[in-house]
Image (cartoon, rainbow, N blue to C red):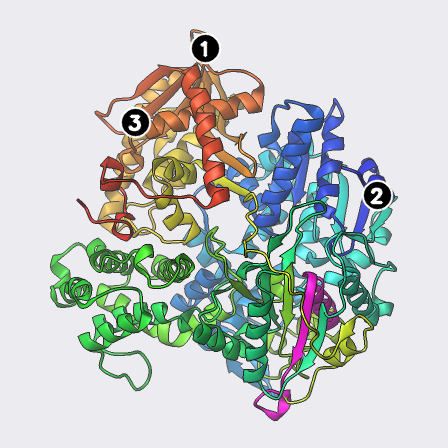
Amino acid sequence: MRYTDTQRSAIATVDDPLLIVACAGSGKTQVISQRITEILRRPEVHPRNVVAFTFTNKAASELQERVNTLVSKELGEMTGLAEMFIGTMHAYALDALQQHVPETFKFSVLDEIQTRLFIDRNSSKSGLTKTKALVKGQDKLLKRYRDSRLYMQVLNILREDTVDQELLREGLMDSLYAYRGLLFEHNYFDFTDQLKTIVDLLEEDPDSPIAGTLVRHVRDNIRYLVVDEYQDTNPIQEKLIRGLTRWGANLCVVGDDDQTIYQWRGSAVSGILTFADRYEGVQTVTLGENFRSSVGVVSLGQSIAELNADQRLPKRMVAAGHQRFDRGDLLALAFDDAAAEARWICDRIEKMRGLPFQDTSGAEPRGLSWSDFAVLFRSVNKDAGPLVEEFKRRGVPYVIKGLTRLFEAPEVQACVKLYEFLIGQTGGQKPVPVTEQNVRDAWHAADLGLDDTDLDEGMAILHRARTLNLKLHRRITFTLQQIYADFLAAVRIREERVPGDSTRGELAFYNLGKFSKVITAFEQINYKSSLSDLYDRFVSFLTYQAPDYYAESDADVGYATPDAVVISTVHQAKGMQWPAVFVPAMRKNRFPGKRHGGLNAFHIIPPEAVEDADRYRGTEADEVRLFYVAVTRSQKYLAVTYSPGESNLYRKESDFFAFTTRNPYVLTAEAPLSAERLEPRARRETPEVTLSFSELKYLFECPYQFKLRFMYGFDQPIAEELGYGKSLHDALAEIHKRAIDGDIVDASEIDELVDRHLNAPFAGTELVKQLRTAARGAIRRYLRENGDRLHNTLHSEQPIRVHVAPGVTVDGRIDLIRRLDTDETSIVDFKSTQRAQADDISRDQLHVYAAGYKELSGCNADLVEVLNLDDSTSSSREIINDSLLQDIQSKISDAGEALRDNQLPRKSSWCDACARCDMAGLCRDST
């Protein structure tokens, strides 16, 4: 690849602290990848010496793929790449803690929705209802549900920002300590506590009894740190950076101050603006060439950025790509109302579909398809309604990024009706009875191809759950997720039965999979409620909390990328690009947004206690940056539109809209489109997907099962004993890690080991006792049979990576690699009854690990072993089969092709894999 002078300068600077200022579309990922390759070219550098932080998992997969490709091409076969960390800061924190701090091995992570549910569930113990806000001189206690999101923000500010505790109101830190103690009691991290925990530990000395292993790992291994999207880091992330570079590691940060859009989460644009002043000897390189967009888009973007002239680094973005500007590509149009605006957007998309578009320089043009269009709102929740209705009316396929407006989808409304029927009424202060006919009507309205006979079978499931004496039956039969799975299986719902083209079936299953995730989030926090209480709570949640909770979440589900128009917030579109972008609802007080009144975090935390507290509330400059991000998502076509809102507050046009009309590249009246059309064809990119072996085994076993689980997001019901198998693995991991350091565990430590690692959050008291007894027996048996060989441990929980197919990387951890008395190297996988799987799948897994071990070390292992931890269960030991090793690599390659082409078929007929698949009910009848 040919690099520009500035790109070459950034790539070559590897010894000094480096700030890369990267304008939108400037090819920064390629530059970062090439710079990492140059670092790895040095003979004294090993992959484990490099850590690279990205903002999202998707960006991590892309960077990982680029580095793999460049290393293979330029450096040939390199061992140990699996030990180079590329991922988000949160992922790094969790990985490092659970590799080097045994006390955290059993902790799991709550996402934002689960955190809020956890606080709601424990409103007093978490400190929520004991926390006071000062409103007009009066103290007011926070309330459950209503204020839990605000309380989360307060907790995050206290842990993430620079806070003067002396200025805090009495009792506030007690609330924080209560919340953190509750997390610890339940073996949870929230996103912030992952960072807070590792940052605190990294400040310890290398001989610290708890933190020492982690600190020594950082000191001895990390020599180069790369931080992408640096402009959106907050103070605790800056502390993590300091902790990782404390021992002299080289630091490179990459970002664009013009794209700082997460100030409401605490990111501070001052971080990137002052980086060169805060670090000694910094070299600064600006990447100003935009290879993504046409000169028209670039010109508009540059003029928007310059609105913040006194608050930005000096730079100029110039168009350097292959996209041609044609008069009429950029439009700024005003409409009489939101309905007219929505009709025009639909008209425009339908007219543009099939327009020739060239993805890359020299590529064969293709016809624009639905997924080439994105509609970016300042607020999807508040403004997307008319467009969604117009899309529905015309049958235009669309997806709403994240989970916003999920509960308006007809199929999701039908799902809600299932649980209302179980309690006999709707939620709300004025409940309405829900009858069987109401359920039937909702599912018919969803139009998923179900007939009355299908619904007869589904209603039988609901009647059984509603009428049986629940005390006489195992609760696992009646969990929220089990009822959902049983109902969908009973009505024989199938993707291909959904009326319309295949895209409509995909979109329906996409939403049904999202609802499965909603169930999981709720049930994991509320699982131990009585069943009747669980049903009531869930309906209440679906009525009062869920629509708002998910509207405020930026979570996304699965790998699915249907050929459909994308509706998204500007924030969610960060890092994305589309051939054609619409930015509607450009109203005064909406975009730029106005500061809203009402209760906020600084009624609880005095503003003077937080450094630059005003940034959390947003400024006009922040809104400028957000508009810049919106515009620069477009590769060629851009329409910025205005229609008056319903309230007087939003009736006037935005200043940003007026500014857009003044750009010389923008037309304020629609121009005729080219008459040339090609067959619409969605862009099929190589998916940059990182699969765990757990995911890969589903892809091997049945591609359609993989699609249901990971592309649509369907979850399996919770098992009461869930966590037991991992607990055994965690205890064994500590045993082997200590053995590597020369500390051999003996039988006297078994009880303490099991107590430290056992975590079965869904088990009742009696079952926990049984699991604890079983775990102690398994560990005692293991030490009795293997204790004299612990000193032969080479690696424990060793990360491996297999990269065979373009765009698909398999990541995993080998439970144990040990040297046998015969001087052979053996790869060991531990199994328990709970984690049992077919022998051929285990054999495949171990040969994937063997391939990963070779990539890691450059050496071939000799044997693969399965050690069963249960009493009276046989283990296995086999010589590595070279032909099977080759077959596995071919299977991974074929899996990559299947993912790229979206060819994920079901089994041709019922088989053993179907019999043990808990997704079979979404696929076929059991015959």
Magenta region, residue range: 622-650
State which tag comes first along the sequence, 1 or 2: 2
| Image location of residue 57, percent across then percent down | 57, 48
Is 275 magenta? The answer is no
Neighbour tally class for label 1: few under 14, some 14-19, many 20 plus, Cα within 10 Å: few
Q: CA distance from mark 3 to mark 1?
A: 23 Å
- Tell me the residue that label 3 is attached to: 839
Q: Is residue 150 left or right of residue 891?
A: right
State which tag comes first along the sequence, 3 or 2: 2
Q: Nearer the viewer, mark 3 or mark 1?
A: 3
| Image location of residue 663, percent across then percent down | 81, 73
Q: Quadrant of the C terminus?
A: top left
Marks 1,2: beta carbons within 8 A: no
Instruction: Residue type at mark 3: give it.
Output: Asp
Neighbour tally class for label 2: few under 14, some 14-19, many 20 plus, Cα within 10 Å: few
- Tell me the residue that label 1 is attached to: 824
Residue 258 or residue 391, whichever sits in front: 391
Indicate the secondary structure of the residue bearing disc 3. helix
| Image location of residue 547, percent across then percent down | 43, 73
- The part of the image, by quadrant, that contains residue 696 is top left
Residue 77 or residue 657, whichever sits in front: 657
Instruction: Residue type at mark 1: give it.
Output: Glu
Q: Residue at x 51, y 74 (%)?
A: 131
